[in-house]
Image: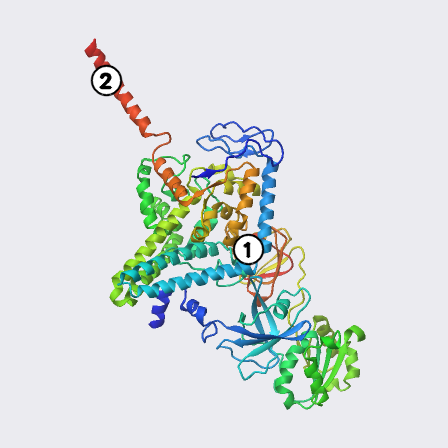
């Protein structure tokens, strides 16, 4: 089941833990006199999950994490370089091997084998390679081919555009309401503090469709398409430039998967076309599931829009830790998620090599326990279920339950009938 | 047409990315070389034999080649003099490397380089060559400064009939190519003067006038530490008609990593004097340079820009990064401050 390590009653980290601050009044800023921590409440007025920490403790936490980061930076070396080069070699061999097998995709065993291999290769390329290399995790190697400024990924969205919306916006404003578009991708409601609108009723369906066409959803997201459509700013020069780049990329990707490789397969044209479509679908479903697990599951915290004004290094770390969720499982699962299964570690240190996240995870968990912070993790199926549960639950207004609604409807019906019944009886 | 089809079939990669997996030394590939063997010359010097890629354009004796070497996972580029003749039977080339104390790359090449390793190569370059000169020659070298001269001797000695070589090394055992040079001296092919500095002290330019009385009439090629070359250049300028001294420096003077410095933005032409606490990004923006930027806290890598030369300090951990133009070093401008004069390619 999903485990959210419960904060202990008292933190052994340092000074006596102050009483939790009472739920603050809406819109105001509470500054507890004893420890000087500030908290900007969310519309729901939920209490601050870090209220038990003093300013000193938060900064001590920051220093501890800085030291841990430096330890990893200082020990990066040949072992890490060999790891990423091996993943690159395996990915390219698997992709080319699978595509070679698909030249004969008319034969069912070749189709199954080739499609499975291509799906895995495409997932590896986006997750353990593309995402992480574009984060600059491997820039320290100074290899111009494995560099955040040079890598182009096997994806519909051009890497330049994706780096802006992902590295710059999402990783900076992680889980800040109204600033982090990853919270529901701007089309869904995944937190109680996001305002409910009637359109959210359809979000389970929207989420499923998004999962199937995820890479194109990311193109729209990176373009900020909804906003430009809403505000009628599609004539904007930058938008048009980005749109052209995106369409060019989509064209190149489609030509490869749906034209050139099917043509090379000759009589197996349609079978290879289908194989590519299925591989892309598998990758869409997989990456969508993994990414939902990063910030949507229960136990993940969100933050008020204005909460990050003047945020310190320690506070930034705090937000990343309790705003992310991990997935636990096998080594193969970790690699296939691009180590985003270590979402907490990734959000703390987005530019550390992904093969190091598993190594530091026990220490991050220990830090969370010592400072009385939640460390949300669960098996893949549990986290996916948890994220979907949130999507379903929050498609309805807060506090809305079927039983409650049925009872309400009956009560209203009763009220209506009471007078006529009384009249009849009377 | 076929090339275009191949490109479309492997997009967003290039056909070369796949070809590199099986044939990294093929014609048309980025220039690389495979290490054939490493042979010791002295306790701390070794010759690295390399099979260069098909596009290797050859070299002139005395020239150097830039090697891109991965040490502890990090790519470093260093120039080394070619010590092989231009045409060898197996088409291999060689460089001779002396391990300098604290030298990341030289120590790796001398002590840990395994045969079979792929290295990145540049084409041969440098104008420290004999050219058409075949008259009397003086070579003045110290330490690994012998390496470009050895390249010249191995190719041209049979065309020269008056060669004097004055070489400095701490002891006789430290003389790189000592046995080969002494053999040439014994056969009367050249006159070798060894200066063992741990016993005899450093060679002063004036000493040369005693050792080689006709030095002024000779064309001289000198290669060695910066201080030695500076001293010889001053001496030649004061005593000898111009154009008779040719020098080779491996690397510019060591960069002083100080607090702050002047930033030169080479493309926009802006010059900014900064203190050691102002980031390159802030300084550039304040000067109106179009700086790429992102999170401004060192995580998103949107601000990365080439540091053509100079030294910067990472404000997060105090780490110093230095660069010379060929290194291709890129820095995160949002967390880097000048630690000496810097040229930024923006």
Q: Secondary structure at mark 2?
A: helix
Q: Nearer the viewer, residue A138 or B344?
A: A138
Tell me if residue A221 comes above or below residue B309 in the rendering.
above
Q: Which mark is residue B259?
A: none
Same-chain check, marks 2 and 1: no
Q: Nearer the viewer, residue A425 or B343?
A: A425
Can residue A311 be seen in the rendering of this structure?
A: no
Residue A335 at x, y = what percent? 45, 53
Q: Residue at x 57, y 29 (%)?
A: A32
Please indicate whether residue B194 sits to the left or right of residue B260 in the image: right
Q: Chain of mark 2?
A: A
Circle 1 sits on which residue? B332
Residue A326 at x, y = what percent? 46, 44
For the N terminus of chain B, which image quadrant? bottom left
Please indicate whether residue B75 sits to the left or right of residue B221 in the image: left
Can residue B186 be seen in the rendering of this structure?
A: yes
Tell me if residue A259 comes above or below residue A394 in the rendering.
below
Estimate the spatial distance between the alpha carbons at disc 2 and disc 1, rounded to whole Å: 72 Å
Total marks shown come to 2
Residue A346 at x, y = what percent? 50, 48
Q: Secondary structure at mark 1?
A: strand
Circle 2 sits on which residue? A417
Tell me if residue B246 comes above or below residue A193 in the rendering.
below
Q: Residues within 10 Å of mark 1 (few under 14, many from 20)?
A: many
Between disc 2 and disc 1, the foreground one is 2
């Amino acid at each position: 089941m999903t485990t959210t390590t419960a904060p202990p009653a008292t933190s052994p980290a340092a000074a006596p833990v102050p009483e939790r601050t009472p739920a603050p009044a809406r819109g105001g800023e509470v500054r507890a006199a004893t420890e000087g921590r500030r908290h900007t409440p969310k519309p729901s007025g939920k209490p601050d999950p870090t209220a038990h920490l003093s300013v000193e403790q938060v900064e001590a936490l920051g220093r501890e994490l800085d030291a841990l980061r430096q330890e990893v930076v200082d020990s990066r070396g040949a072992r890490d370089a060999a790891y990423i080069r091996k993943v690159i070699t395996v990915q390219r061999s698997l992709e080319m091997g699978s595509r070679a097998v698909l030249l004969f995709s008319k034969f069912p065993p070749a189709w199954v084998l080739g499609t499975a291999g291509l799906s895995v290769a495409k997932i590896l390329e986006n997750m353990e390679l593309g995402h992480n290399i574009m984060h600059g995790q491997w820039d320290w190697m100074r290899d111009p081919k494995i560099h955040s400024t040079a890598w182009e990924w096997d994806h519909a969205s051009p890497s330049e555009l994706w780096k802006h919306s992902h590295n710059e916006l999402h990783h900076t404003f992680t889980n800040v309401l109204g600033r982090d578009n990853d919270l529901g991708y701007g089309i869904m409601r995944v937190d109680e503090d996001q305002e409910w609108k009637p359109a959210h009723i359809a979000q389970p369906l929207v989420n499923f469709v998004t999962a199937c066409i995820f890479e194109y959803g990311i193109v729209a997201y990176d373009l900020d398409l909804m906003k430009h459509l809403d505000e009628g700013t599609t004539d904007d020069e930058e938008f048009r430039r980005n749109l052209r780049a995106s369409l060019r990329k989509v064209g190149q990707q489609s030509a490869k998967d749906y034209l050139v490789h099917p043509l090379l397969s000759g009589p197996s044209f349609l079978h290879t076309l289908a194989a590519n479509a299925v591989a892309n679908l598998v990758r869409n479903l997989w990456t969508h599931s993994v990414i939902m697990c990063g910030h949507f599951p229960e136990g993940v915290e969100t933050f008020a829009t204005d909460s990050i004004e003047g945020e310190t290094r320690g506070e930034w770390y705090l937000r990343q830790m309790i705003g992310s969720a991990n997935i636990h499982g096998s080594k193969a699962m970790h690699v296939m998620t691009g180590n985003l299964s270590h979402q907490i570690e990734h959000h703390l240190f987005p530019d550390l090599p992904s093969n190091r996240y598993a190594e530091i995870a026990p220490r991050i968990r220990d830090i969370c326990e010592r400072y009385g912070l939640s460390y949300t993790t669960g098996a893949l199926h549990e986290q996916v279920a948890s994220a979907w549960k949130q999507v379903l639950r929050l498609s309805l207004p807060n506090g809305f339950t079927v039983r409650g609604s049925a009872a309400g409807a009956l009560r209203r019906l009763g009220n209506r009938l009471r007078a006529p019944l009384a009249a009849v009886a009377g | 047409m076929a090339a275009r089809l191949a490109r479309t079939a492997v997009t967003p990669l290039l056909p070369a990315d796949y070809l590199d997996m099986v044939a990294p030394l093929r014609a048309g590939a980025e220039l690389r070389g495979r290490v054939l063997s490493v042979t010791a010359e002295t306790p701390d010097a070794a010759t690295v034999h390399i099979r260069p890629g098909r596009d290797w354009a050859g070299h002139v004796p005395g020239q150097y080649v830039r090697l891109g070497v991965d040490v502890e996972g990090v790519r470093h580029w260093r120039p080394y003099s070619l010590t092989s003749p231009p045409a060898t039977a197996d088409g291999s080339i060689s460089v001779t490397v002396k391990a300098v104390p604290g030298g990341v790359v030289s120590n790796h090449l001398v002590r840990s380089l395994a045969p079979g390793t792929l290295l990145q190569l540049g084409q041969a370059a440098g104008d420290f060559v004999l050219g058409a000169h075949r008259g009397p020659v003086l070579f003045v070298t110290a330490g690994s400064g012998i390496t470009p001269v050895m390249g010249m001797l191995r190719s041209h000695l049979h065309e020269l009939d008056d060669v004097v070589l004055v070489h400095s090394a701490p002891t006789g055992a430290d003389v790189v190519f000592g046995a080969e040079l002494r053999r040439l001296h014994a056969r009367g092919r050249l006159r070798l003067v060894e200066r063992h500095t741990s016993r005899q002290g450093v060679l002063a330019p004036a000493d040369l006038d005693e050792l080689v009385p006709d030095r002024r009439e000779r064309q001289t090629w000198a290669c060695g530490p910066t201080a030695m070359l500076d001293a010889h250049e001053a001496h030649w300028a004061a005593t000898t008609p111009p154009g008779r001294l040719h020098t080779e420096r491996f690397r510019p003077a060591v960069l002083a990593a100080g607090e702050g410095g002047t930033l030169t933005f080479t493309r926009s032409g802006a010059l900014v004097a900064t203190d050691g606490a102002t980031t390159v990004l802030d300084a550039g923006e304040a000067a109106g340079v179009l700086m790429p930027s992102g999170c401004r806290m060192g995580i998103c890598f949107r601000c990365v820009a080439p540091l053509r030369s100079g030294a910067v300090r990472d404000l997060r951990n105090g780490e110093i990064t230095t660069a010379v133009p060929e290194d291709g070093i890129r820095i995160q401008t949002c967390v880097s401050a000048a630690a000496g004069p810097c040229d930024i390619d923006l």
